Image (cartoon, rainbow, N blue to C red):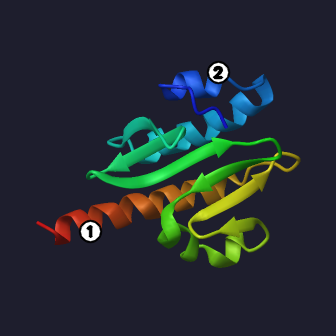
Amino acid sequence: MNTKATTVDDYILSFPSEIQERLTQIRTIIKTHASAAVESISYGMPAYKTHGKPLVYFAAFAHHIGLYATPSGHSAFAAELSKYKQGKGSVQFPLDEPLPLDLIRSIVKFRVQENTRKALISK
C-alpha cells in the first residue's frame, strides 16, 4: 500500500500497470454510482464519503486488492463474499483472479443507499 500518495491519481499511478487497471476499475464504479462522493486519501488509501460519512475505501497489496465497505457493506453481501478472505468490514480480492466487478458495483450501490437513508433519518 502506498501511504505517501496525497491524491487518488498519485496512489493509482504508484502501482504497476496491471494493478493500476484494477484500481481504476474500482474507482470508476465508485464515481459512476456515487457521483456525489468526496474522494480523498485516508489511512493511506483511496477513500470516499457521502453525506460526510465513509462510503468505501480500497487499496492494493502484494497479493490482493482490499475493499473496505464498513461492516454493513460486507454483511449485506455475506454469501457472495464468502469465497474471499475477509475481516471486519474488509474483503480481499486475490490478484490472480478477476475482480468481481458486478459484486463491487452492488456493494457500492448498497452503501450509497445506506448513507443516504441514514442522512435523511438524521435530518
113 or 51, which lies in front?
51
Q: Earlier in the sequence, mark 2 or mark 1?
A: 2
Choose top left, top right, bottom left or bottom right for residue 104: bottom right
| Secondary structure found at label 1 | helix
Q: At numbered mark 2, what does the secondary structure look like: helix, strand or loop?
A: helix
Distance, label 2 to label 1, CA atoms, is 34 Å
Q: Position of residue 2 (x, y in %)?
A: 64, 32
Number of numbered discs: 2
Q: Is residue 122 left or right of residue 25?
A: left
Residue visible at 72% across and 57% down?
92
Between circles 2 and 1, the one closer to the viewer is 2
Tag of residue 2? none
Q: What amino acid is at disc 2?
A: Leu
Q: Residue at x 36, y 67 (%)?
A: 114
In the figure, 75 relative to 69: above or below?
below
Quick check: 114 above or below 1? below
Residue 3 higher or lower than 34, as above or below: above
Question: Is 60 placed left or right of 31 in the picture?
Answer: right
Q: Please give the label number shown on residue 13.
A: 2
Vertical arrangement, residue 52 with respect to residue 115, above or below: above
Q: Quarter holding the N terminus? A: top right
122 vs 81, left or right, is: left
Which residue carries the number 1 mark? 118
**Amino acid under label 1?**
Lys
Q: Position of residue 82 (x, y in %)?
A: 74, 74
Where does residue 105 sit, x and y in percent of width and height? 56, 54
Residue at 56% across, 21% down: 10
Closest to the observer, 47 or 106? 47
